[in-house]
Image (cartoon, rainbow, N blue to C red):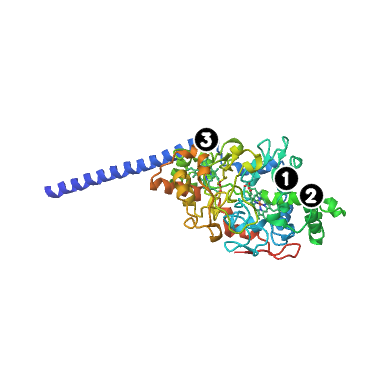
């Protein structure tokens, strides 16, 4: 009897101890979570990151998106009528299946095999096609920022839009930088125009628009939006550019888990992603260049150029003459400024939705996100070890690579000290980049639906893999 009571007491005591241990440990796990949330919220607040950038689009445009105009733009974006070589459209390089970015390490323009995807082949141009998604918020465009809104706001043309010659400042009357940008691609001979048609950029645009204007269905669609076309006036290049830009305005996918978290949805991110974000904004100091404050419009880029030491791969078969004595280099910003101090400088990549890319950096020298980030953490060592075959680039890009020592000589001071992460931290950083920055609406299965089954010109649609 006494023994039984004693046993019961012991059991009871054990139970109480267990309960206390269990409760306090649960409490401390919760405290850890709270602490993680608090720290990340604080960091984001200090950066001025709101997670609400997407909702500012129409206000900054000063109007609603015109859905009919955007849909017309979607057709033109996918129509080879825009390419005087008759075998490429914007979508041949800006593929719906890759966040409207490249399926290749280095873009393939004219004389391609009409495939958009891994098996695309043909002569290479110079660089990888960046994603057109979210470009509505970019204060400057291209790998060397050569198309720029001088106010650093793509929605504000008051200081003018600067382009290299021959356009210069002539596109400054356009309401948004993307409308101005749409004047350029069809004039690029290696991308779309080809070498047969004689004449300058203005002549190429006149010919592209003459072809569009010749198609009754395009006249009908433009006529619904522009009354002057309905009344018999010709379609103008300006209207074409507005349609293309309007479509690009619909490609804003800037509602990733990090945005949800910033708006107060704590469950939007996993603990690993939160820890990865803290590394990005903290110990790894990625935000020093992949900025989110102010004029970066929360796009994870300072929209400035840096030398980060990317290995120089060059195609065996291409139609652009590369830089340097052995024509296997890319001088980056120097091509625009003519200043040798700007050699090898490229714009910090805006890395929202980066996991949709099949290749990384301006020339796609790496083909996995892990390899790209691993490289980025210790450039000097890994640039010298670079092997294009091991990096997984296509055979026509594996060969003789450009010199790396002159690049490393100019390496940005921020890249000179390696960032040391544990395996666990590296995994968390990748998790943040891969999922924390991904807006699910930009995934291929959804964007694929934007590829038209036929276009008003009746021309064939490229074969999307
Ligand atoms: C041959 C492939 C190709 C075609 C066709 C093409 N582009 Fe591009 N696009 C590129 C490449 C490559 C770049 C980056 C070039 C550079 O920086 O030197 C780019 C850059 C851009 C950018 C800037 C993106 C950024 O991050 O700054 C926009 C916007 C764009 N293209 C829109 C278009 C539109 C609209 C069309 C069709 C009218 C088009 N492109 C046709 C390959 C192409
Ligand atoms: C000194 C500025 C700087 C810092 C610091 C920096 N980056 Fe970058 N990052 C760049 C530039 C510039 C590019 C594009 C370079 C190029 O393509 O030639 C880039 C490209 C990338 C890309 C490839 C994106 C694409 O378009 O293919 C990823 C991913 C990336 N950075 C992640 C990170 C991470 C993660 C960190 C922190 C560990 C970091 N970066 C730190 C400047 C920087």
Question: How far from the left and from the top, in percent, is residue 21?
Answer: 28, 43
Mark earlier in primary sequence (3, 2): 3
**Which mark is in front, 3 or 2?**
2
How many angstroms separate mark 3 from mark 2 (CA)? 47 Å
Dot 3 crowding, Cα within 10 Å, few <14, some 14–19, many 20+: few
| Residue corresponding to mark 3 | 45
Lower position in the chain sequence, tag 1 or tag 3: 3
For mark 1, what is the residue?
180
Q: Secondary structure at mark 2?
A: helix
Label 1's element?
helix
- In this view of the protein, can residue 40 be seen by the observer? no
From where the camera sits, is residue 387 visible? Answer: yes
**Along the polypeptide, which appears first: circle 2 or circle 1?**
1
Q: On screen, 67 above or below 451? A: above
Looking at the picture, tell me which residue is in the foreground, 35 or 308. 308
Residue annotated with mark 2: 202
């Amino acid at each position: 009897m006494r023994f039984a009571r004693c046993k019961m007491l012991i059991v009871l005591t054990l139970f109480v101890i267990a309960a206390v241990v269990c409760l306090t440990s649960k409490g401390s796990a919760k405290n850890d979570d709270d602490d993680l949330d608090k720290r990340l919220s604080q960091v984001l607040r200090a950066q001025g990151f709101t997670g609400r950038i997407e909702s500012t689009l129409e206000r900054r445009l000063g109007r609603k998106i015109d859905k009919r105009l955007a849909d017309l733009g979607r057709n033109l974006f996918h129509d080879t009528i825009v390419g005087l070589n008759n075998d490429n459209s914007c979508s041949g390089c800006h593929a719906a299946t890759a966040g409207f970015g490249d399926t290749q390490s280095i873009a393939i323009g004219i004389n391609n095999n009409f495939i958009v995807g891994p098996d695309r082949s043909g002569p290479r141009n110079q660089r990888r096609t960046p994603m057109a998604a979210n470009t509505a918020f970019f204060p400057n465009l291209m790998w060397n920022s050569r198309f720029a809104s001088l106010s650093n706001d793509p929605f504000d043309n008051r200081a003018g839009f600067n382009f290299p010659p021959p356009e210069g400042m002539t596109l400054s009357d356009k309401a948004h930088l993307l409308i101005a940008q749409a004047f350029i691609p069809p004039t690029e001979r290696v991308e779309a125009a080809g070498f047969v048609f004689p004449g300058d950029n203005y002549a190429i645009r006149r010919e592209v628009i003459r072809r569009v204007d010749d198609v009754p269905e395009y006249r009908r669609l433009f006529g619904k939006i522009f009354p002057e076309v309905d009344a018999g006036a010709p379609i103008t290049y300006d209207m074409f550019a507005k349609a293309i830009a309007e479509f690009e305005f619909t490609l804003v996918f800037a509602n990733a888990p990090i945005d949800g978290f910033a708006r107060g949805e704590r469950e939007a991110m996993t603990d690993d992603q939160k820890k990865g974000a803290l590394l990005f904004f903290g110990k790894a100091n990625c935000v020093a260049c992949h900025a989110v404050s102010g004029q970066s419009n929360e796009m994870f880029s300072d929209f400035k150029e840096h030398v980060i030491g990317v290995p120089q791969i060059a195609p065996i078969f291409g139609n652009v003459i590369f830089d340097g004595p052995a024509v296997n280099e890319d001088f980056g910003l120097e091509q625009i400024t003519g200043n040798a101090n700007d050699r090898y400088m490229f714009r910090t990549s805006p890395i929202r939705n980066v996991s949709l890319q099949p290749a990384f950096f301006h020339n796609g020298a790496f083909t996995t996100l892990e390899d790209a980030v691993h490289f980025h953490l210790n450039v000097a060592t890994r640039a010298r070890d670079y092997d294009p075959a091991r990096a997984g680039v296509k055979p026509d890009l594996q060969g003789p690579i450009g010199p790396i020592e002159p690049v490393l000589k100019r390496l940005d001071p921020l890249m000179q000290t390696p960032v040391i992460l544990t395996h666990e931290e590296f995994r968390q950083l990748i998790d943040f980049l891969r999922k924390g920055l991904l807006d699910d609406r930009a995934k291929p299965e959804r964007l694929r639906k934007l590829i038209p089954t036929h276009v008003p010109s009746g021309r064939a649609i490229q074969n999307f893999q």
